[in-house]
Amino acid sequence: MMAVRVALVGLGDIGLTAHLPALVRAAGVRVAALVDPDPLRRKLAGDLAPAYPDIDEVLADDDIDAVVLATPPWVTTGAIVRVATAGKFVLAEKPVATSVAAAAPLLELSPNISDHVQVGLTYRHDPAMVQLREWIADGVLGERLVVRAHIYDERLDPADPAHAERLRNTLRHGLPVLHEGSHFFDWLAYLLGGEPMRIDDAWSMRTDRRAEVPNLTGARLTYPTGHIAVVECGWLTAGLPPCEVSLLGDRGYAVLDCHTFALRLSTEDGDRVVEFPGERTQRCFDRQVERFVALVNGSRPSPSLADGLAALRTSEQVARACAEGEA
């Protein structure tokens, strides 16, 4: 079988540190082109493949089979449409748009084209998610659960003002729950059987009153079969609470460490820890590329564009409720 020729578009932090190494490691993949408007970023990527300032060269190259879009969400929507309608397979970073309204062009794609799009909800690929889903389905934790998701990331580092400014610029395009929520609302949909039935309440807060937009957000949601999820998400604080997801029912309690994806399970049978080989980020990005290669070779997309839009829809609904409930 010939190697899948892939172009990577977007050479920012996630592109250079996660997507590109995973593509290089993957069997059956050849990195055929690199794209970024910034000449310094193109230089940082090295001479692994021809590098271009825009996507036009990639779209014109019939030998390129697929494109990974490691682009910001306000760029990703149009790029998905351009790349997919050019006949190439797409792996697009989440979220796929800054809002449901902005995602409208994606809804106009024909099924044949949208079936060529995989969304980079990367951590759904982790075996820890599969294990949690099995525990829930088998009733190991109980019939109805309270899920607490504390997703705190992007620490404020005074020694790196450029990083802080990039985050503040991202916040101008939406609250933290919109950007991070695409991941953990996809996790919750995957684990709890679909999108939430309702948003019960929500809040947001500016820890720095001088900030343009809130940097902390939270909400309580009700899911199918009566599961309740309490979520918190925040950026740009000098210290960060533990980043974890916990699930509590009358039969057991499970905790997912979001940094390692190690699991702790407590039931009447005792306590145990479940760990998986390899480092979480590398493990998930490698599995994601495997799924992408499978898509190019005829499999269904997983997660699909519909999954990405569902996560965006929940994120936006929660973000709107958070904005209305700002403290």
Image (tube, helix red, strand yellow):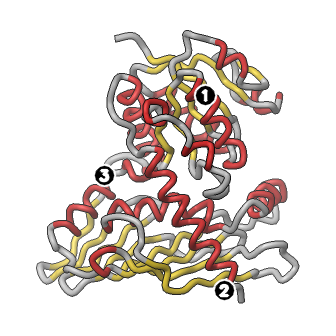
The reply, left or right, for residue 64 in relation to residue 42 is left
In the image, 268 versus 50, the foreground residue is 50
In the image, 40 versus 71, the foreground residue is 71
Tell me residue 3's x, y (percent).
43, 14
The residue that disc 3 covers is 127
Mark 2 element type: loop
In the image, 25 versus 297, the foreground residue is 297
Mark 1: few/some/many CA within 10 Å (<14, 14-19, 20+): many
- Alpha carbon separation for disc pair 3 and 2: 36 Å
Mark 1 element type: helix
Which residue is pictured at 31% across the width and 65% down the height?
193
Tell me residue 167's x, y (percent).
75, 59
**Residue 267 occupies quadrant:** bottom left
- Alpha carbon separation for disc pair 2 and 1: 38 Å
Q: Of all residues shown, which one is farthest toward the right?
A: 210
The residue that disc 1 covers is 83
Which residue is pictured at 38% across the width and 32% down the height?
290
Pointer 3 or 2: first along the chain: 3
**Residue 293 occupies quadrant:** top left
